[in-house]
Image (tube, helix red, strand yellow):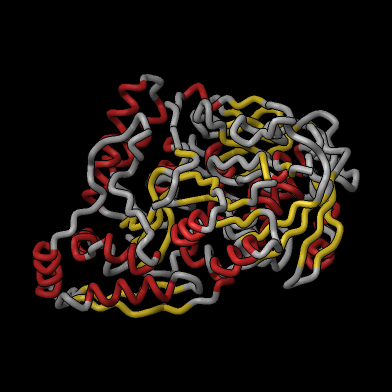
Amino acid sequence: MITRKRSVLIAVVTATALLLTGCAGGGNAATSDDVAASGPVSGGTLRVLEVVQPTGFDPVQVFSSTSMPITYTALYGQFVIANEETGDYDCGLCESFMTSDGGATWDVVTREGMTFTDGTPFDAAALKYNWDRMKDPALGSASAGVASQIESIEVVDARTAKLHMVVPTPGLLGLMPIYSLQWIASPTALEQGQEAFNKNPIGAGPFVFESWTQGGTLKLTRNDDYFGDPAYVDAIEVQGVPDNTQRLNGLISGQADIALNSDPSTFVEAEAAGYPNEIDIFNGGIGFMFNTKKAPFDDVRARQAVAYALDLEQLSNAVNRGNGSVPKTLFTKESPFYEDIPLQTFDQEKAQELFDELAAEGKPVEFSYTVFPGTGPATFDALQAQLKQYDNVTVTADQRDSSEQGVVTTTGDYNLASSSLAFVDPASRLWGALHGDANRTNYSGIDDAELNDALDAALATTDPDEQKAQYKIVQDRLAEIVPYVLFQEYLNGATVTDKVHGVEMYGYTQPAAAGIWLEQ
């Protein structure tokens, strides 16, 4: 069992929350659970094991905002920060971020006088430069989908950028922390080329780059000219270790102070070894995403058949060594939007009936599952083993290199892939992932009129009861049209030694480097 150090509580999100104003410092204060008797102190070097070995530090190279959060919050700060108390978003590096027309345009105002560490102004022109780069197909950003929702960026004045959206995107604000639009780099440094930039990345965050050995250690030192409160630790040393067991062993053997993790089994092993975990459990979860624009899964019956066919508890146990937890509902019980509406029903008889029905029409369910290194092979083996019990269905492995992760789904180059439908804020994340108009971030391609209407209505109302009613429709439709089958809770967490404090886990881009401190 995973001890829940922190559970996700989703506050009711109102339409007026689309206005976002700044709060200084980006959340440096440690919580009461973290604070030792003497309170936060400065000094020391924080040794970190992250889950990804960097190939560079250009924001367009980042796969997701949870893969290297300490590295990137150190170099670039947090542009937008999820607020656990309100369920809303606060500005970190912006002064305000708002829409007055339902998401057709957004006005983003930068902080007065702020600069990157090379002296380049952190202004509206810098935002435009960074976000336009994300759309460049030649750079292959995994965030190109959401960036391409922005049709154009108008520099209104030195500090104000107006985003003109391809279609109204009322959920843009909540998408920011999920994707690498969160990380803003110096245009002057980026102009030197990606190779030069990766040797000396320049941001406006609470730490500055000191050195990096590819395949080795990244060293960062505190930026005493940071616009907000200075970070606590003097320096950070980061290594990327993809293997879960190696990260935990590195922590236990004294090679690190904090190890990031999302694997349920590793959290269980850490707790058994006496190390505390800080875990954020999201709404939704991780699982299979169907490409609803391609055969065979453009036919809802094929999606329903696969969903009925799978014993998700068995599949999760096979992938997570018996430690996984299957999300039964879209929202956790702590959420005000919770409904007891099962996301999936295991029914072998119904599954076979649908497989046979499709085969009789000349459409046997034949598809590939996209396999990436890590848990991909185990997931495929478990999926294939279960589907072998049925007639008229065949799954093959589509082996891909880890460098393609994130890009395959954004381009639609898949039949079935592992993905997340995990979220803090339902208003932004669910709209961006499931609305038919959110085509560039709706990677499953699902487009259902009733679902679209409910997502729109949930964003438009300020009435909590009406929001709950609309999200009930969303949950009913997801159970019916099955764009996703979720078989694992989405965990974002860290295992720490007893000298580490100030580790805040809530939403994406966490834990933030600036707030962590060490007992001296």
* 147 to the left or right of 336: right
Tell how many labels: 0
- Residue drawn at x 33%, y 62% is 316
- Residue drawn at x 70%, y 42% is 516
- Residue drawn at x 59%, y 68% is 242
Which residue is at the far top? 463
Residue 53 against residue 93 in the figure, above or below: below
Residue 210, image quadrant = bottom right
* 18 to the left or right of 383: right
* 47 to the left or right of 335: right
Query: Toward the viewer: 374 or 113?
Result: 374
Query: Toward the viewer: 175 or 28?
Result: 28
Residue 302 against residue 205 in the figure, above or below: below
* 33 to the left or right of 426: right
- Residue drawn at x 68%, y 51% is 70
Q: Can residue 415 be seen in this view?
A: yes
Which residue is at the far right? 119
Q: Can residue 186 be seen in this view?
A: no
Q: Position of residue 188 (x, y in %)?
A: 85, 52
Residue 111, image quadrant = top right
Q: Where is residue 255 in the image (x, y as percent from the top left)?
A: 71, 63
Query: Toward the viewer: 331 or 252?
Result: 252
Q: Where is residue 277 in the image (x, y as percent from the top left)?
A: 54, 49
Residue 43, image quadrant = top right
Looking at the rendered image, the quarter that the C terminus falls into is top right
